[in-house]
Amino acid sequence: MELYVLRHAIAIQRGAPEIRHDSDRPLSGAGAKKMERIARGMQTLKMNPDLILSSPYLRARQTAEIVAREFEAESVLELTPLLEPGGDHEELMELLAGEYASLGRVMIVGHEPSLSELISRLLSGDEQMAVTMKKGGLCKLAIDAPHYGRCATLEWLLMPRQLIRLAEAGQ
């Protein structure tokens, strides 16, 4: 399985008076535009996800929707509380090993520090590895048998600006 780990794009600031709950923070206008450019860069990588799993938090969902539109993959976008901040990574990996084990390419969209902790767990077996996931950053892991522990190989970790450059080079 190819597991693509995407951090949500730039959202409006915490504490904005019009937002009652953190889960309701949307992408900023600039964040959404930047994510569109990032998604075009992702398209040059020909990832074509079989499934996009996203946190239901608005900023992550909007990020996943932008990617789904770019890949014409709206029908494979699913929301899961397992990708909310503090979500259950062990249960997420059980889901990937069970219901979604036959899929070749899965993308998950979520939040920090949860995503870095998950990447660390899958690469090293614990959450101590320092991984930096920028907003709009994307990581590719290769996994033979998904489980909650050391099971992955890092293929690449791209920053948003690198993905945007891929988009610009592909035009």
Image: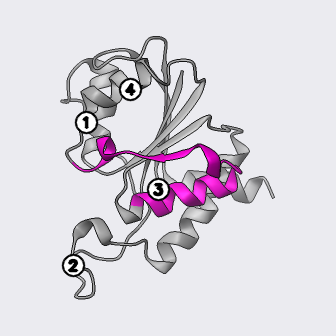
- Say few, some or many: other residues with alpha carbon within 10 Å of mark 2 (under 14 / 14 to 19 / 20 or more): few
Nearer to the camera, 126 or 19: 19
> Disc 1 marks which residue?
117
Label 2, label 1: how far apart the Cα atoms are: 27 Å
Q: What residue range appears in magenta?
A: 60-85
Q: Element under label 1?
A: helix
Which of the 4 image quadrants contains residue 92? top left
- Would residue 134 be counted in the magenta stretch? no
**Do the residues under discs 2 and 4 have CB atoms within 8 angstroms?**
no
Q: Quadrant of residue 148?
A: top left
- Camera-side mark, 2 or 1: 2
In the picture as drawn, the residue positioned furthest to the right comes out as 171
User: Which tag is nearer the camera, tag 3 or tag 2?
Assistant: 2
Question: According to the image, label 3 marks what residue?
Answer: 136
State the CA–CA distance, disc 4 to disc 3: 24 Å
Earlier-in-chain disc, 2 versus 1 = 2
Q: In the image, 160: left or right of 92?
A: right
Q: Amino acid at mark 4?
A: Leu
